Amino acid sequence: MPRALVGPWLLWGVLAAVAAALSLQDVLSSLSAASAEVDRALVLYSLAPRIAVALLAGAALGLSGALSQAALDNPLAEPATLGVFAGAQLALGVAAILAPAMGALGREAAAFAGGAGAATLVLALAWRRQLDPVTVALCGMVVAMVASSLSAALILSRGDYLFALLIWGGGSLTQEGWRASAAIAAVLGFGIVWALLLARPLGALAAGEIGARSLGVPTPVIRIAALAIGVLLAATVAAEVGLIAFVGLAAPAFARLSGARSGRILAVSPVIGAILLWLADSIVRRLGEGDAIPTGAATAILGAPLLLWLLPRLVLADRPTAPERRPRRDPARMLAVLAALAAGSIAAALWVGADAHGWRISSVAEFAELLPFRGPRVAAAAAAGAMFAAAGVILQRLTANPLASPEVLGVGAGAGVGLAAVLLGFGAVSWPLQMAGAGAGALAALAVMLAVAGRGRLGPERMLLAGAGIAALCLAGLNAVVATGSPSAFALLAWITGATDALGPDQAIAAVVTAAALAAPAAATLRWLHVLPLGTATARAVGVRIGAARLALTTIAALLTGAAAMIAGPLSFVGLVAPHAVRAAGLAGAGPHLLGSALAGAALMTIADLLARTVIFPYQLPLGLFASLIGGGYLLLALRRR
């Protein structure tokens, strides 16, 4: 072995020894307790199976990530980035409602179907872009976000019945027997056999599509077979222990850093994955009682920084960009159309409703009676949509990236961390304090994203992936809180989906006042928003102080996102859809782009609120669910086309 590779392998040996020592200490401390028989039973049927599950699940996820990355020639491919886990969670929730008596095999089949469906959708969307790493990762992120929103809506609607799905989302390794270990071991053995058979064909794929075909390798069959095995491994782990994030990404990456190449990555990744998950779970057991800190959240805290570290090292092919739309010569006419659309949407949300006979328009008397109930939520939704859209315009022009938005760059998830910190630290607090916490969290997430992007000199596409990593890190913390099942957990879950049914006049007034207060400083930055997309050199040539401009724009965008996220949750995609659609309509100037996007965002959010209130009347769905479906669908279409 080369001397340069001795250090990494020695490190893995030390980490394995640390995990073994912690596990042995837990076993010995349990056996030395006074209640010998009870503690022996706990060791035999709880602690020992938990250690076995950590080793087997880590190995399965490591092999799953290695197979996915080899099949797609993509160092960012793994179960989480391909949407497998989110699809499995959604399928398990649906199956639990439609077939509550399903056994273990039914649960595993549902998880595999959901994970395979999500991965297939991701690959189908990225196929026209030749499955390049960035497109696959972005499509996977969007599919995962939409599926997660649907899962959260299911949990909220059947919280008493689907409470276990909350714990599943955190990734719990707690065991009450050996059944899960046996199930994962069987699938892992099956996967290892197929990995051995696919090792040489997958190695040929590294030479490129043309080179592999010249060697007689049926590339589509090999890719599909490897991905199917990877999805099966990840879905089995998901069905048995829940969402264990980023082990599938970290294990192959560390295998490469340790010197493994080609087929050896398939052999080394399961070993490293087992050590990673074993060590993470051993540390989790030492830090809290039971599952106070879910193991899946702990692994995400490890994997998200790894994703950020990998971005500067990711090789991307040069691809042509979409031509810029010419600005309209008469922006006033388009702005008038958007203003009429926003006004019509607000009027429809106030006047249109549903009853036992279907949709209907309220009479004047009914309107007066319903206004105190509909008015606050419509005003709050419109204000949130306008603020999300304005923040999206600022971020797109600040980063020169037409796909940037608070949701995609992880700023909305950062607002959730700030909100969670306030709720956990102070309990029931006032709305302004919650909004301040959300704004602080959004500002911190955006500052980290810009710092990482600037230090690594990341281009627009890498910046999106940096946001995806920050979002994963923030959502891991939120999952850890949600998995506790506490009152704060359900409050955060309702916030994630954007529930507006409990909004009152005070919250609506606060949202409208905040939007109006931030409109003035946003309007004062129009010169910066016009010049910065032209490049740093041009901006300096016309006298713009780059540092001050970026700091001011970052702060305004974070405050807009924090305030809007308090109402609509972090996953609405309004901050992407509205600015993108308005620019496509020809409003490319900074002023028309900002004003038009705010109007379009208000219209989109009020329409989403109307649908959430009426689609399954008399029940209500979360506002963020419909906004995510509309915005996520638009983003997937945009990624597929450009």
Image: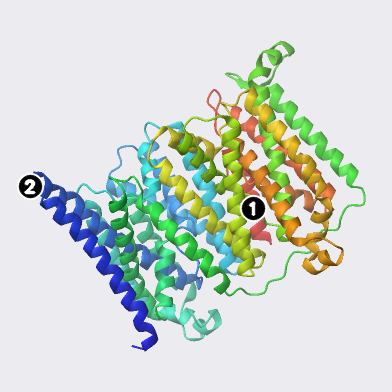
Measured as percent of width and height from the top left, residue 8 is found at 37, 77
Q: Nearer the viewer, residue 578 or 116?
A: 578
Q: How crowded is mark 2: few (under 14 residues within 10 Å), some or many (20 or more)?
A: few
Going from N to C along the chain, the mark reached first, 1 or 2, is: 2
Residue at left 26%, top 63%? 19
Residue type pointed to by label 1: Leu
Which of the 4 image quarters holds residue 562?
A: top right
Residue with the mark numbered 1: 635
Q: Which residue is drawn at 39% across and 55% down?
A: 298
Report the number of discs: 2
* Label 1 secondary element: helix
Q: Residue 36 carries which label?
A: 2
**Residue 503 in sight here:** yes
Q: Residue at x 60, y 47 (%)?
A: 442
Q: Could you tell me residue 501's position as x and y percent?
A: 57, 27
Amino acid type shown at disc 2: Ala
